[in-house]
Image (spheres, rainbow, N blue to C red):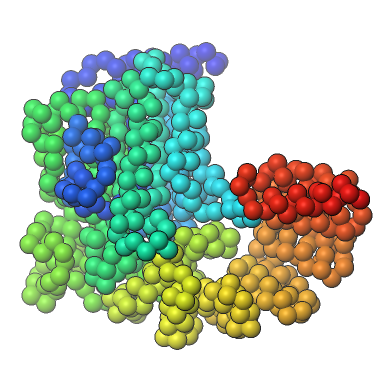
């Protein structure tokens, strides 16, 4: 049976290689999709940015086609990537905000290409695209493994170099394409999706004193360099590989009073680079002089375009095949939809929905906006009052894509919410009703949104961060996420007296997560209230029963109270649940030593020493423990 299946795939592959008449249609064997998080089009050299260091993107644009006005369907990572991979707008694929699962009923590039015999692999750089949110369907390999910090805490992003290393390892393996230096013409067909998180905030090192925009450009250069390393490693396979590069959304640096992204749907955070290159495309653009496409396109166009390049059609999509733009045709007039439900999910404000038609762009909001983007590209002059007929027409159109209500579905797992918050996303306070009706317009919360963005971006630290958080809490006393962050900011400064109060207020405001209770437990334990600390940790375990950090903290607390057996049981359970939780393993070795179980303490410490990274500062503590045990 296995031989028959392989033979059948070989026949299909051969058939695809024959009878091609249109240049650029079905002329590629493989697909490389590169998405660069938070990448603005106007910071790429091919788009005219003189300070850019983007040689790969510029080279691909020169050999292929560049879309000058490409727009995301949502200014946030998961919904935008879901649109890229499904060809559907967010109402169609279901992921309306980070942490909201992609519908299992919708086909993706991976499910389609796998069904056509390609080997499929994804290598992602950040937690918003974790496999639990549904984009892993159809991939033979979905590599979303993220590193830990020196203390063993799981991080929520990884550098581009590690993502590319993982992709190269797969490509060189028998499970991939057995890629050798220089490539090979008889390699299996493949689809690789490479996601790079640079230049997402915080950009570089915010403490080095350089302007944020310079550090942002530097991270773009890093992403380009690492993507180029993968592209060049393909060797001769490059001539058989279509490559599509896109940003998932842009980034605001004060335009419209916005910082970062996710709340507003202005073109500052919707316009992205989109570049397509590969077999036959360069020749076609030379014949048609269409190396730059001025028509507006959407990232929903990527999936149908990619499948066309590989020789078949992807149906039931909102996007269109863009190959006609470089083969002498033109795009029919159409509307482009975009939205942000983050204001509703994250803050309880009204969502924003928009439609772009001809030169008009309409934003449905409690205070609607209409811009003639053909003349007013910066969206500075709202023509809502002057053009009532256009507003009425486009308001009806936007409602055909989506209303303001939202079916939230299952609640986001608390640990997942914590990890999204670590990347600067609120991850949902769960205070929003399903409907956006009667909610504040995000424009009226513009200043608050900007302050929140600066706090969560990682660009502030020390006194500046503390001052910003105190200002937010002063103006919004019930902002639970700000209260939680303020509690940790005080705790890190050694002021547990104030931190304890902020943790209590955060819990009262509805932020009943492990983070809230663990922070509170730490402060209670520091002032000697071990019973109170244990109660807080038990609450943490109630909301997150399987959280190994919570279990480990309960073990450490039991050790402090003299319950050695209970401590060992809890710490062993934490390590078993997460072997990478090195702090729990160290405390387990300490408790073993205190209990006189020398051999188990030595074995646990030796194993920990092997797991710790070479430069880890914790190595010295483990070595001291082993030396003390050896001297017993």
Who's the residue at 13% across and 47% down the image?
295
The quarter of the image holding the N terminus is top right
Task: Choose top left, top right, bottom left or bottom right for residue 336.
Answer: bottom left
Query: Residue 173 in the image: x percent, y percent?
Result: 51, 24
Who's the residue at 45% across and 86% down the image?
474
Q: In the picture provided, is 13 more to the left or to the right than 332?
A: right
In depth, the one of 308 and 610 nearer the eye is 610
In depth, the one of 552 and 297 nearer the eye is 552
Q: In the picture provided, is 75 more to the left or to the right than 499?
A: left
Q: Is residue 391 above or below residue 75?
A: below
Who's the residue at 82% across and 61% down the image?
567
Q: In the picture provided, is 159 more to the left or to the right than 37?
A: right
In depth, the one of 406 and 82 nearer the eye is 82
Residue 513 in view here: yes
Query: Residue 492 in the image: x percent, y percent?
Result: 58, 72
Query: Residue 268 in the image: x percent, y percent?
Result: 24, 61
Q: Is residue 22 above or below residue 249?
A: above
Residue 435 in view here: no
Who's the residue at 8% across and 33% down the image?
289
Task: Choose top left, top right, bottom left or bottom right for residue 440.
Answer: bottom left
Task: Choose top left, top right, bottom left or bottom right for residue 547.
Answer: bottom right
Q: In the picture provided, is 396 more to the left or to the right than 201?
A: left
Total numbered labels: 0
Query: Residue 144 in the image: x percent, y percent?
Result: 51, 44
């Amino acid at each position: 049976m296995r031989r028959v299946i392989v033979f059948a795939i070989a026949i299909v592959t051969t058939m695809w290689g024959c009878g091609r008449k249109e240049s650029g249609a079905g002329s590629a064997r493989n697909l490389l999709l590169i998405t660069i998080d938070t990448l603005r089009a106007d910071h790429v050299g091919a788009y005219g940015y003189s300070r850019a260091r983007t040689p790969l993107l510029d080279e691909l644009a020169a050999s292929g086609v560049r879309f000058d006005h490409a727009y995301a369907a949502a200014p946030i990572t998961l919904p935008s990537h879901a649109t890229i991979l499904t060809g559907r707008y967010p109402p169609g694929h279901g992921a309306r905000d980070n942490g909201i699962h992609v519908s299992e009923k919708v086909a993706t590039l991976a499910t389609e290409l796998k069904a056509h015999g390609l080997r499929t692999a994804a290598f992602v750089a950040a937690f918003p695209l974790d496999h639990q949110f549904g984009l892993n369907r159809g991939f033979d390999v979905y590599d979303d493994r993220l590193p830990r910090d020196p203390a063993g805490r799981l991080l929520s992003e990884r550098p581009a170099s590690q993502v590319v290393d993982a992709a190269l390892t797969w490509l060189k393996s028998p499970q991939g394409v057995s890629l050798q230096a220089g490539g090979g013409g008889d390699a299996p067909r493949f689809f690789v999706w490479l996601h790079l998180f640079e230049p997402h905030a915080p950009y570089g090192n915010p403490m080095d004193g350089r302007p944020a925009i310079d550090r942002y450009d530097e991270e773009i250069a890093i992403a380009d360099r690492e993507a180029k390393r993968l592209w060049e490693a393909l060797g001769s396979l490059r001539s058989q590989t279509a490559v599509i590069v896109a940003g998932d959304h842009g980034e605001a640096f004060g335009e419209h009073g916005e910082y970062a992204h996710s709340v507003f749907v202005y073109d500052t955070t919707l316009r992205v680079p989109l570049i397509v290159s590969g077999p036959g495309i360069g020749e076609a653009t030379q014949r048609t002089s269409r190396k730059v496409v001025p028509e507006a396109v959407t990232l929903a166009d990527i999936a149908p375009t990619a499948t066309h390049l590989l020789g078949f059609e992807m149906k039931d999509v909102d996007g269109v095949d863009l190959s006609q733009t470089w083969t002498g045709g033109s795009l029919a007039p159409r509307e482009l939809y975009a939205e942000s439900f983050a204001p509703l999910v994250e803050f309880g404000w009204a969502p924003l929905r928009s439609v772009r038609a001809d030169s008009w762009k309409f934003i449905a909001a409690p205070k609607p906006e209409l811009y003639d983007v053909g003349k007013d590209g910066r969206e500075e002059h709202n023509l809502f009052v002057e053009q009532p007929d256009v507003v009425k027409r486009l308001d009806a159109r936007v409602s055909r894509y989506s209303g303001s209500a939202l079916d939230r579905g299952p609640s986001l797992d608390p640990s997942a919410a914590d990890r999204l918050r670590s990347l600067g996303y609120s991850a949902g306070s769960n205070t929003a009703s399903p409907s956006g009706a009667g909610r504040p317009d995000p424009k009226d919360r513009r200043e608050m949104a900007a302050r929140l963005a600066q706090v969560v971006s990682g660009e502030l630290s020390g006194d500046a961060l503390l001052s910003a958080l105190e200002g937010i809490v002063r103006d919004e006393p019930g902002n639970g996420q700000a209260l939680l962050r303020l509690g940790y900011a005080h705790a890190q400064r050694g002021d547990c007296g104030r931190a304890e109060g902020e943790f209590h207020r955060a819990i009262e405001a509805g932020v009943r997560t492990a983070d809230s209770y663990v922070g509170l437990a730490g402060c209670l334990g520091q002032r000697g209230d071990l019973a109170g600390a244990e109660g807080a940790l038990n609450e943490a375990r109630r909301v997150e029963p399987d959280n190994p950090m919570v279990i480990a903290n309960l073990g450490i607390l039991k050790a402090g109270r003299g319950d050695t057996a209970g401590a060992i049981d809890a710490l062993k359970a934490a390590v078993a649940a997460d072997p990478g939780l090195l702090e729990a393993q160290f405390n387990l070795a300490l408790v073993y030593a205190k209990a006189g179980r020398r051999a188990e303490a030595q074995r646990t410490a030796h194993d920990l020493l092997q797991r710790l990274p070479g430069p880890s500062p914790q190595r010295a503590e483990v070595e001291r423990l082993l030396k003390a045990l050896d001297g017993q």
